[in-house]
Image: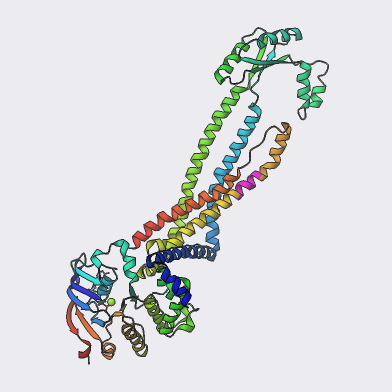
Amino acid sequence: MSAPAVTEKAVPRSERSQARRFAGWREHHGWSAAASLRRLGARPLGTLMTVAVLGLALALPLAFYLLLANVQSMGNALGRNPAISVFLKADQAGAQARLLAGELGQRAEVAAVTVKTPQQGLDELAALQGFSGAVHALDDANPLPWVLVVQPRAGLDAAAVDALAASLRGEQAVDLVQDSSQWRQRLDALLGVGHRVVLVLAGLLALAALLVVGNTIRTDIASRSEEIGVLLLVGASRAFVRRPYLYAGVWYGLFGGALASLLALAIELALAGPAAELDRAYGGSLMLGALPWWLLLGAPLAAAALGWIGARLVSAWQLYQAD
Amino acid sequence: MLRFDPVSTRDEGGHEALSQLSFEVAAGEMAFVTGHSGAGKSTLLKLIALIERPSHGQIVVDGQALAKVGRGGIPKLRRRLGMVFQDHRLLMDRTVFANVELPLLIGGVAPAERGRRVRAALEKVGLLSYERQLPDSLSTGEQQRVGIARAIVARPAVLIADEPTGNLDPQLAVEIMGLFAEFQELGTTVLVASHDLPLIKRMHKRVVVLDHGRLVADIAAEEVL
Ligand SMILES: Nc1ncnc2c1ncn2[C@@H]1O[C@H](COP(=O)(O)OP(=O)(O)OP(=O)(O)O)[C@@H](O)[C@H]1O
Ligand SMILES: [Mg+2]
């Protein structure tokens, strides 16, 4: 009995009451978090519906992100080597091809030139899945031309590569010039649009999530207006009254966001089989994208923040009205 | 301590629920407010709890001038008051214990201390064995006693009650009023609104009589026969 009395006296009163107030505040946070969770559990159907709507809405931008990431890494894998393939005319023989290759190799904007024989082209074609049978039928009369693979100097910008391709097209012996940087540019532009679309979509669906949580909390508060009236009468502050509803918003967001992450993971897993096959067809060089861990963990956290904001806005409005 | 320094309330229609009302209840005193229906008893108590604001005049509660209490200060003021309502206003989805604990929870009192004080309050109103029950399973009189326990658990300086015996049979009503008298003896300022004149007479406390919002009689405890 005497020991606590001594320690109580040793601490200044204001400090002690402040520490107690903080402890009380923390305790009520714990109580609110638990009570709001119990209330969600008390009407499981309504809670599940809200969480499901949030999960589906938030999974959509994640799925779109996944799609974009895959297209991008595919583009990266295929466009990593910006070499220009120069197909010579059918009447050009090996000697002429090597002569031209030497000439082109002298140019400042060219790093290297390799000569591909018609037979090498045929072998490459045969290596691609499903082509071997058809290709072997051509063994006697190979229709493929000689090809020069021109590697532009590293650090050359897109315009300079374009100019190089154009000048190659002007060569007498050249039939066709295939410049991979061109489709790469188009893909990049398309991906840029795609990213913008994901951002807009994420913004709109975040707003929708905010409204869904806000509306759920609104009906929640309306159905408990009597309790809120009593709490205010016995001296509860607005923050105190609001707290369980803010936690309810956080729970809705957290569960909805977690569901969205799980759905996105499920989509990724469903795509994993076909993606691996595609990757194998390209000799394992595609490095298909997966959802990064920070996004899978970040989605529930961001959704929880959204739920909090939705609950905060609605409760502020409704408690103001309650007065 | 309670003081009304000519206080008037006027609604949008110009009707005065209270007009030029002046009186004081000393610290530790107990008084009844009585009068016909519509006399302004509830309005008077609402002014004390800052549920309504007067259009004129000054009200002081436990040394605090209410005009100086802003919106943000209302919760703090209410924590210094105990309030009992005719319809008890208990939270039906919480136990008797949790209902009585509410003011202490709001006040940030430590858990062990809360348990002690809630049990002391429940013991005072004779309901200690009901702490785990829900209010639904209690009789009207018992519910009202839970409401009283909630009002006094935080040891407020001022206790106000609006028709606290309105729903009770005469025997229970006497018991409840007796409880209020006990809290007065412990030093609490008590103001009870009631139109039950026979009951008021039995209590031998000061009586303030209102009629149409005006104070028409202020009878000292000794003069109550
Ligand atoms: N919400 C309100 N809006 C407008 N006027 C009101 C309101 N509440 C009460 N009044 C009016 O204020 C006056 C006083 O009412 P009050 O409720 O204080 O009376 P009371 O003495 O408590 O009556 P009762 O014994 O019936 O409870 C009455 O004229 C009543 O019509
Ligand atoms: Mg009344």
Q: Is residue A235 above or below residue A310?
A: below
Asked if the stretch drawn in magenta spans residue B26, the answer is no
Q: Quadrant of residue A235?
A: bottom left
**Does A87 sit above or below residue A292?**
above
Q: Quadrant of ligand 1?
A: bottom left
Is B71 on the left or on the right of A187, as rendered?
Answer: left
Residue furthest bottom in the image: B225
Highlighted magenta segment, given as a residue range? A262-268
Query: Is residue A178 placed above or below A42 in the rendered structure?
Result: above
Where in the figure is residue B66, as x and y percent of width and height?
25, 67
Q: In screen coordinates, is A170 left or right of A315?
A: right
Structure colour scheme = rainbow
Quarter of the image with the C terminus of chain A in it: bottom left
Say above or below: B33 vs A279.
Answer: below
Residue A100 rendering spot, x and y as whole percentages: 69, 9
Residue at 44% across, 53% down: A310
B213 lies left or right of A35: left
Membership of A265 in magenta stretch: yes
Is residue A315 visible to the viewer in this orientation of the structure? yes
The answer to which quarter of the image holds residue B36 is bottom left
- Residue A16 point in image, percent of width and height: 41, 66
Q: Is residue A148 visible?
A: no
The x, y position of residue A191, in whole percent, is: 56, 32
